Image: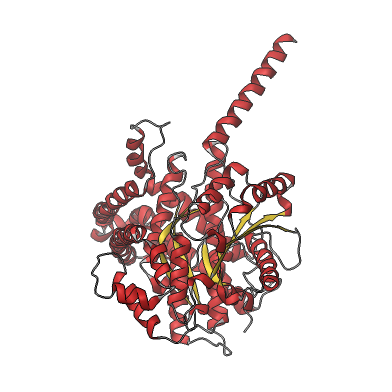
């Protein structure tokens, strides 16, 4: 079965499936309008059904946010470096730990793993001392001020750095500055790792959209040749892709290596950490804080739902699997989420994502200036929402007489994928504005008790759902890194008040970004260029403002002299 997204003209079936998310998302709004005109009662039933379903989901989400946060906290306190070292000699470790009791997360599972490994034949489970981790860090034109803290955080991990191979993968189209930065980083940090390599991805390669997938695939193929030269088995290498502003938890590589060793069917797995957008959360504007926190919550929630867990942003996968399936897709701007589906269909459904309950910390969107930041956030969310392009890819493989995956389980995955994108687009609009539709669009609605009470009913449900907002506020403060000294305690108040923006953010960003992406698919105007989210820091912005102020002062002085 072809696991690649088609380029050029699509089949009629594929085009219909590409259009399907947009048709359903717009159709949900159109149906509400039509029902409001024809029958206020039917419109009320339709609207309340959607809102009640959303209300039930909101309750489940609040529960999973709390449970997921608790899981993450417990996992972060586990010494995964110690647990990994126990796997080197599982018989000794098992005899030492089997009678112990501990409340540590997954402790009994650790003891069971040691028991299984003790009984297995030599070589059935690899030893930690035989495993390498390879880190591919893609970059475009980010400054060294953005990249260097990420590398330092990698150095601060507890994993043996002499078994960590770093590949700094940067774009030729990024210009001269990133080329210089790459060489500086190699010279400065190369000595700390097993090896440190810089790989430049040429621009305009055939069959590639302008995106991260082409860059990391090019780096992956370079790594393949390097490992062959070093005579390192692909099955002994775990590859992590991590954006150049990401900071892994100190136990991340130990944890991933532990899970890789203890799973028997390890080739058919990938490993997904919890991505938290909190690196610079104190510095970004309020709307971006709400978006970033919401995205962090979604990743926490996803870790609690293994049946629907997908690859997102930073993740890890065995090298032998990557080589076999030709690494990542070079034909989509959302290569991370798409990698799940490529792997799922390539391995005939024998593929799972293992949750890693420790975080990788990422930057919230922060550009040079408030307006630029607002725009950059929308562009980033539109790119993520373009994951709706996977609906056609998945549907084309599921509704196929030559399929190699089980139909019903794959159909369930397809429906969840489609529902997620349609809900993301239309639900905020329907919940916020739908209650008034019958009264505004139908003059007869004023005499309908159902239509007349509908706004009040919707408002009551929304008030009850405020419990979810309170949960969000509580957990968001738990996620916050320490407040920088440059901010007063009064900024904590703003961190609470920002949640009043939630309804507007949900419509302007989440809903509109989804509709934008789905409209591109609906019209066949494909997004084939990865819009890089500009990464900057407060210090860089301050320098930029100072330089602009100086330029303006020099200009004013020059004008005065004239």
Q: Is 289 above or below relative to 451? A: above
Residue lying at 76% horizontally and 67% vertically, measured from the top left: 206
Q: Is 309 above or below relative to 264? A: above
* Residue 363 seen in the current view: yes
Residue lying at 40% horizontally and 32% vertically, measured from the top left: 487
Foreground residue among 215 and 211: 215
Foreground residue among 488 and 471: 488
x and y percent of residue 111 in the render? 32, 75
The image quadrant of residue 62 is bottom left
- Name the quadrant of the C terminus: top right
In the picture, measured across the screen, residue 549 lies left or right of residue 155, that is: right
- Name the quadrant of the N terminus: bottom right
* Residue 535 seen in the current view: no
Residue lying at 58% horizontally and 81% vertically, measured from the top left: 346
Foreground residue among 277 and 473: 277
The image quadrant of residue 200 is bottom right
Q: Is 431 above or below relative to 557? A: below
x and y percent of residue 457 in the render? 25, 56
The image quadrant of residue 258 is bottom left
In the picture, measured across the screen, residue 485 lies left or right of residue 551, that is: left
x and y percent of residue 446 in the render? 28, 54
x and y percent of residue 294 in the render? 40, 53
In the picture, measured across the screen, residue 538 lies left or right of residue 85, that is: right
Residue furthest out toward the bottom: 401
In the picture, measured across the screen, residue 482 lies left or right of residue 374, that is: left
């Amino acid at each position: 079965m072809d696991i690649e997204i088609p380029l050029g003209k699509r089949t009629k079936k594929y085009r219909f499936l590409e259009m399907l998310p947009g048709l359903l998302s717009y159709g949900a709004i159109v149906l509400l309008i039509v029902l409001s005109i024809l029958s206020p009662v039917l419109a009320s039933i339709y609207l309340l059904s959607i809102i009640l379903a959303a209300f039930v989901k909101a309750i489940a989400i609040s529960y999973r946010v709390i449970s997921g946060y608790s899981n993450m906290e417990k996992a972060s306190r586990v010494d995964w470096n110690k647990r990994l070292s126990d796997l080197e000699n599982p018989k000794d470790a098992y005899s030492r730990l089997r009678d112990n009791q501990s409340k540590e997360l997954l402790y009994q599972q650790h003891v069971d793993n040691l028991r299984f490994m003790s009984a297995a034949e030599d070589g059935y489970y690899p030893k930690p001392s035989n495993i390498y981790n390879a880190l591919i860090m893609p970059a475009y034109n980010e400054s060294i001020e953005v990249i260097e803290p990420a590398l330092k955080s990698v150095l601060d991990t507890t994993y043996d750095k002499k078994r960590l191979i770093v590949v700094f993968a940067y774009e030729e189209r990024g210009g001269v500055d990133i080329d210089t930065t790459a060489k500086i980083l190699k010279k400065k940090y190369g000595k700390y790792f097993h090896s440190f390599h810089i790989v430049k991805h040429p621009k305009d390669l055939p069959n590639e959209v302008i995106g991260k997938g082409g860059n990391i695939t090019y780096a992956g193929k370079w790594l393949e040749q390097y490992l062959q030269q070093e005579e390192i088995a692909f099955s002994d290498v775990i590859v992590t892709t991590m954006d150049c502003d990401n900071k892994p938890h100190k136990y991340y590589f130990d944890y991933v290596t532990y899970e890789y060793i203890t799973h028997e069917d390890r080739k058919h797995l990938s490993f997904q950490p919890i991505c938290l957008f909190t690196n610079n959360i104190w510095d970004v504007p309020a709307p971006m804080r709400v978006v970033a926190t919401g995205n962090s919550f979604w990743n926490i929630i996803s870790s609690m739902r293994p049946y629907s867990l997908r690859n997102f942003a930073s993740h890890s996968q065995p090298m032998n699997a990557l080589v076999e399936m030709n690494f990542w897709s070079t034909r989509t701007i959302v290569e991370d989420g798409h990698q799940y589906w490529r792997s799922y269909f390539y391995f005939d459904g024998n593929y799972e994502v293992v949750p890693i309950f420790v975080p990788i910390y990422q930057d919230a969107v922060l550009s040079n200036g408030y307006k630029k930041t607002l725009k950059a956030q929308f562009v980033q969310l539109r790119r993520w929402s373009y994951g709706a392009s996977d609906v056609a890819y998945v549907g084309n493989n599921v509704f196929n007489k030559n399929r190699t995956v089980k139909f019903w389980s794959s159909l369930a995955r397809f429906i969840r994928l489609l529902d997620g994108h349609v809900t993301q687009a239309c639900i905020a609009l329907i919940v916020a504005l739908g209650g008034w539709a019958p009264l505004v669009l139908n003059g007869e609605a004023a005499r309908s008790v159902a239509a007349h009470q509908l706004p009040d009913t919707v408002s009551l449900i929304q008030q009850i759902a405020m419990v979810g907002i309170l949960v969000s506020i509580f957990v968001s403060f738990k996620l916050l890194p320490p407040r920088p000294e440059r901010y007063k305690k009064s900024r904590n108040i703003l961190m609470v008040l920002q949640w009043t923006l939630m309804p507007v953010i949900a419509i302007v960003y989440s809903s509109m970004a989804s509709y934008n992406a789905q409209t591109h698919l609906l019209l066949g105007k494909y997004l084939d260029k990865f819009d890089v989210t500009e990464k900057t820091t407060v210090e860089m912005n301050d320098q930029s403002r100072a330089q602009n102020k100086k330029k303006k002062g020099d200009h004013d002085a020059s004008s005065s002299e004239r």
